[in-house]
Structures are given as C-alpha cells and as structure tokens.
Amino acid sequence: MDIALIGRIIPVFVQAAWTTVQISLLSLVLGLAVAALIASLRLSHLAVLRFFGAAYVSVFRGTPALLQIFLLYFGGPQLGIQLEPFAAGAIALGLNIAAYMAESIRGGVLSVDRGQMEAARSLGFGEGQSMRWIVLPQAAKLMIRPLGVNAVALVKGTALVATISVVELTYTAQRFIGSTYKPFEIFAVTAVLYMIMVYGLTLVIDWLDRAYAEEA
Amino acid sequence: MTDVRPMIEVRGARKFFGPLEVLKGIDFSVARGQIVAVIGPSGSGKSTLLRSINHLETLDGGEVWLDGVQVNQTLARRAFEKHINSVRQQMGMVFQHFNLFPHLSVAENIAIAPMKLKGMAKADARALALKMLDKVGLADKIDAFPARLSGGQKQRVAIARALAMQPKVMLFDEATSALDPELVDEVNLVMKQLAAEHMTMVIVTHEMRFAAEVADRVIFMADGAVVEEGKPDDLFRNPVQERTRSFLKKFLNG
C-alpha cells in the first residue's frame, strides 16, 4: 500500500471529482426537464403523443447508455453534430436518465388516488388546473425517492464518459494507473470519492423527502 | 309551481361499461328544492347515474340538463372543457371516500376552488371557509389537516368544500357508506340541515331509514333501470313491484 502516492494524487482526484459533479448536475437538470416532457406525453389523452413518449422510453432504456454516448459523440459528426466530449457526455447521459426519470414521474402521478382528480374536477377545476393544484403537489412527494434512485444511478453512470476521454474521475484514475502501475490505491481512492458524492446526494434526497413529508 | 322548470332533468340516459349496459335509458327529473333518494342493490347503476349528472361518467346516450342548460352537449374539446367546468361549479359533489385534498389544510380544501375559480381574495375565502365550517359544526378544525380528522369530520369538511362554491344542487354518492356506524349520524344531520334549507339534492344511499326521513321522492333502481319511484311512504310501505319488495325485504332482514 503506497500511502504517499495516495496523498500525492488526492488534490488531482478531487479536481477530477468536481468534473464528475458538474457533468452529473448538468445531465440531472437536462434529464429532469426532458423527463417532465416525456412523462406528460405518456400521460396524454392523445394516443399519438403517448406513443412518442413510450417509444422514447423504450429506445433509451432498451439500449446501453455507453452505446448512446458513442452514438452521439462518434456518430454525431456524420449528422453535423460536433460536440466536445464533456458536452456530448452530459447530453447523452441526460437523455438516457430522462427515460428512467420519466417513468418515476409518471409513476408518482399515477399513484395519486383517482378520487383526487375527480374531486377537483367536480369543483369545476379544469384538467390542467387539477393536475397543477391537486395532483402534482401530492405526486411530487411520491416521486422524490424514485427520482433519487435515478440520480444516484446517474452519478455512477458518469464513469461511462471516461470512454470518450472526458477528464472526470474514472478517466483520471485510468490515466494515473498507466503511469504508476498502482491500480489498487488509485481505484480505492476513486471509489471513496464516488461514495462521498453519492452519500452527499442521498443526504439531499433524505432532506427533500422529509421537507415534503412535514408539509402534510 | 307549474312554470318552474326542473333543476335536474335526465332523459333516456344510457351507459355501457364494455358490453355491459349499466344504464338502460333512465328518465327522471328533480324539481327545484326537491330531495330525491336513489336506492337499489350494488351494481344497479345508481352511482353511475349520479356521476353522469356532473359528467364524471360520460353517457353513451341521452341527455342531462341542469337548470335549463344541457350538461352533456356536443362541443369541440376546448369549448366543452370550458362549458363543463362552469356547469360543475354549480353542482356540489360528495364522494363515498371523501376525497379531501390531503396536502391542504381544511381551510385550504374549502378555499381553493373559490380562490382559483372565482378569483376570491385569500382573506375572503378564509372567511367563507369559516362560515361553511360553522355550518357543518367544525369551525375549530379550520387549520387541521385531513389526516387528523375522523371519517365523519372528513365528510363534513367535504360537504363544506362543495357548499363553498354555492352550488345549485348537491349530489351525494353514498356519503355515509364508508363511515363507522357511530359517525353516520353527524353527516346525516348536516344533510338534513341542507334539506331544511331547501337545497336541491340527489342522494344515492343504502340507508333506507335516512332516505325515508329526508327524501321527497325515492327512486328504486335495479339492473340499470328505474323499477319504481314514489313518495317514501308509498314506496317503502306499499311497493308495487315485486323487485322492489324483495329488495326491501332483504334489506330489512339483513
């Protein structure tokens, strides 16, 4: 065990972990926005919109995330989409996690008792108003946990963008192993940093869950 | 009296659930200030009939009219949404399972519709909520959340919520069926009080005694059709139809 090596690499790895945090946050924001759209398609009255929503989920959940990253980064230029590795990684991961998050959102909305929508409609609220004032506030609470699970998967999934040479945590680890031949120390430090990030995220999720639970 | 048009009129109401015909052409009307109780075995279509009055169920045939306006008229989707929202504001609906909004306080449950739909100011809406709660005897619960209330209290809040929109009619869908027996009376009392105020009401119920006490007219439904209707005294004491007799007998024995 090379303790001195660990001490030396930590500043660089913390820097790399920061890149992982940034790419996670960007894909999380993109993922949530796309997921909200896809979920609303899946819950639409119009069969054609439901079809597009379902197709999106099938495609992005039904193929490897790694392949989606490759498709965008390596295949993109053929279609005139030229992206930096960081941008390609964040977008591909965001589009991928959106498929899972859309299902979490939809699940939350469908878990709200049907009587809630009926009671709102019977008072004279329109469909959108009922959704906004009555169903979504209750669904939000039910979505926090499943979306949290998606977010944790996303943070760990960012390791995939190492393959398109985004200088994040896993990529940095591989590079240092190449020059030091100490894979145990380096992967151990890397694993600890991932755990710290995931732990921080679960604290945020727990806090959100509690904040919402207290409201009612 | 003769020139007064009915408050609710249902003509030839038909409804299918898949191949099953649950309403087989129902006709009935409710005069202004009248109280009609609808009784019948489960699956007779009485709840479906009530729910189709405010279009929570869409009829496959027939018409529903509220105070001279057709409820289920044919309009483009957007126009119909607007139409039905305004019609529903004139009908209060009380559900078997209360359907209070659990994320809102009692005051907010009652105030949200007047505020969002009628543009009432927050302070006025709260005052209105208090007034309605006073009516159902729950003014002290104004800041409680639904989870803290008993079933009977929840249902009284649900009634207050419906009344806050100042509806022309009140529809009760087995309002006391989900309640513990000792909580039924407090809800029935509120409904009797509304009756005394000449609120037009349609009450779907399993409680024959209450129906007999409060209703001006009782409708007995079975298998999606009206079997018999009349004044409570006549229908309960001297039912004409065999189907009514056997239902009432079973009910009184059970």
Image (cartoon, rainbow, N blue to C red):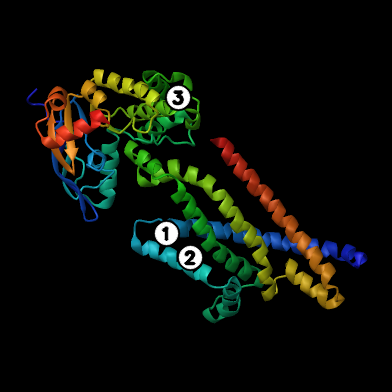
Mark 1: which secondary structure?
Answer: helix
Residue B123: mark in rendering: 3
- Residue A57 is left or right of residue A181, and the answer is left
Foreground pick, A190 / B25: B25
Cβ atoms under marks 1 and 3 closer than 8 Å: no
Residue for point 42% across, 33% down: B112
The residue to which callout 2 is attached is: A57
Residue for point 42% across, 44% down: A113
Foreground pick, A27 / B176: B176
Vertical order, A38 against B71 (above or below): below
Mark 3: which secondary structure?
Answer: helix
The residue to which callout 1 is attached is: A42
Cβ atoms under marks 2 and 1 closer than 8 Å: yes
Vertical order, A125 against A24 (above or below): above
Measured as percent of width and height from the top left, residue A100 is found at: 53, 61
Please state the chain letter of the residue tagged with numbered disc 3 in the rendered image.
Answer: B
